[in-house]
Image: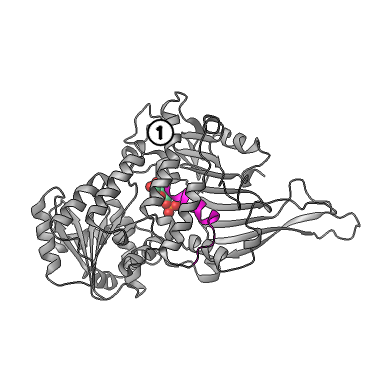
Amino acid sequence: MSFDLVLFGGTGDLAWRKLLPALFQAFRHGTLPAGGRIFGVARDSLSHEQYRSLIRARFDEVDLAKRPTAEEFDRFAALLHFIRMDLSQPADYARLAATLRERKADTVVMYMATAPSLFTVACEQLAAAGLNTPETRIVLEKPLGHDVASNRAINETVRRAFSEWQIFRIDHYLGKPSVQNLFALRFGNSLFEPLWRRETVANVQITIAEDIGVERRGAFYDSTGALRDMVQNHALQLLCAVGMEPPINAHADAIRDEKLKVLRSLKPWTAETLSQHVVRGQYAEGTVNGEPVPGYRQEHGVDRDSTTETFVALRTEIANWRWAGVPFYLRTGKRLSGRDAHIVINFRPAPHAIFKSPPGAANRLVINLQPRDGLELHLLAQGADNRRQQAGLSPVQLDLDFDKRFGSERVGAYERLLLDVIHGRLNLFVRSDEQEEAWRWVEPILEHWSGDTGGPRPYTAGTWGPSAASAMIAREGHCWTEEC
Ligand code: BG6
C-alpha cells in the first residue's frame, strides 16, 4: 500500500519530537508500509537534504529506545522530502497538488501539526486545490478551539472539505498502550464487569501528574491552561474509558457512541458544585526531582500577573444506572511531585467485618498509565503473624507490570496512531460530537473562573498541588492514594 504523508508544521516541535520519531520507529519495526513518502511542510527555505540533516540533528535530542545508526537513519531519510509553503497562499497548495499528482498514492495523509488558527484556512485551501480526494485523510491535533463555539466553527469548516470518516482528531492518550490495556481489561475479561458499578465501587480517581513545567510553550500555555490542555481531552477520555458501557463491537462508531453517552451523562454543574467541586492551582517556585525550579509566573512567555491554572482537581458524577452517586475525582497538574498517571478504582469495604483490618482498608484496583504500564490489585490477607487467634488482616498487592511482561519498547502512542491513520482505522480518534460535548461540559467552569477574582491557589512546585484538592475529597471521607 503506497502512502503520502504531508506534515504541516514539518519543522515544529511536535514534528521532530514526536511525529517523525514515531514514523521512524514504525519504519524500524517494519510496520510502516513500504513505498511511502513523507513531506515536511513549513515556511522555511530548505532543500530535501537540508531538511533531512535538520531532522537528523534533532533526533539526537529525542528519547529513542535505541539510537539510529547512520545507515538506518539514511534509509529512513530517503522517505523524507521538504516543501516550502505559506499556508495563506493558494499557489502553494497548487504546487503541493502537482507534487502529489506525480504518482497516485493509495492514501494521502494531511497532518495538521500547526497552530490551530491555521486549520480552517488550510482545509479551505486544500479543498480549493482539489486535495480533498476520497483517498485523503486529515489529522487534527488538539486544541480544536477554546470553547464550544470555536470548536464547532472549526469542525464545520473541516467538514465542508472532508467527510467525518476522513477526519482523525487525535488525542494521543488513546494511543497509549496502557489505555489499550484498560479497554482489554474491561472488555476482554469477564472478571471485573460485575464489580464495575455503583454497588461495589466507592469512588474512582484519575490522576495525570507531570513533573515538567510549561517548557518552551509558555505563551501558548498561558492562553490555554490545564483545563483546556489536559482535562477537556485526555482526562475526560480516560473517564470515558472507565465509565462507558461495553460497546456492541470494536468498530469506531460503536466505541465512540458509548463514550459520547458518558459525556452526555456527566452531572451538569451548579453554582454550588462549581465552587465546592473544582479546585484550580498555579505553581510557585519549588524543587522538583532535587532541582530548584521557577514559579509559573517567572516562566518565559508567561504574563507576570497570570491567573492561568496549571493544576485542576475536580469531582463529578456519571448520572446513569451504573454509576449514580459514585464520585469520579480527576486531577492533573504541571510541576507536581513526579510524572505519574494512574486510575484508581476504590471498592467499598466488606459489608460486615469478622476480621480485624487496618482502618480504611478496602480493595483497590490501580491502573498505572505512566511512567510504568501495569495493574495493581490491592487485597487484604492473613499476614505473617497468623499464630494468634486475633491476628488481623494486612494489605497485600498483586502486581502485573506490562512493561516487564511484554518488554518496555512497545509501540508508542504516536506510532500506533499514525499507523491507524495510514490504515484508515478511526477507533482511537475522537468524533466531533464527543469533542463538542466535552467542551460543553468544561465551559461552565471557564465561565465561573472568569467571574471569580480569587484566581488559582498557589502551590509549591514539587508537591501534589494545593491543599484545597485534598480538602475537597476529604469532605466526602475519601483521600487521594498517596495520602491514604
Ligand atoms: C499534551 C499537553 O497534550 O500532553 C502537554 O499539551 C502535556 O501540556 C502532554 O505535557 C502530556 O503528554 P504525556 O504523553 O507526556 O503524558
Residue 147 vertical placement versus 374 (above, below) = above
Which quadrant holds residue 212? top left
Taking the magenta stretch, the answer to whether it contains residue 235 is yes
Residue 451: in magenta span: no
Residue 253 at x, y percent in the picture: 41, 62
From the viewer's side, name the closer residue of 28 and 262: 262
Query: Against 184, is 170 above or below?
Result: above
Q: Would you say 477 lies left or right of 386 here?
A: left
Give the percent coordinates (x, y) of residue 102.
11, 70
What is the magenta segment's predominant secondary structure? Answer: helix
Residue at x 90%, y 57% (from the top left corner): 388
Tell me, yes or no, if residue 61 can be seen here.
no
In the displayed structure, 324 sits above or below 415; it is: above
According to the image, label 1 marks what residue?
A: 308
Q: Quadrant of the C terminus?
A: top right
Mark 1 secondary-structure assignment = loop
Magenta region: which residues? 233-248
In this rendering, position of residue 69 left or right of residue 454: left
The N terminus, quarter of image: bottom left
Q: Which amino acid lies under the numbered mark 1 shown in the image of this protein? A: Thr
Query: Which residue is painted at 26% across and 46% down in the image?
Result: 115
Image x and y of residue 65, in percent? 41, 65
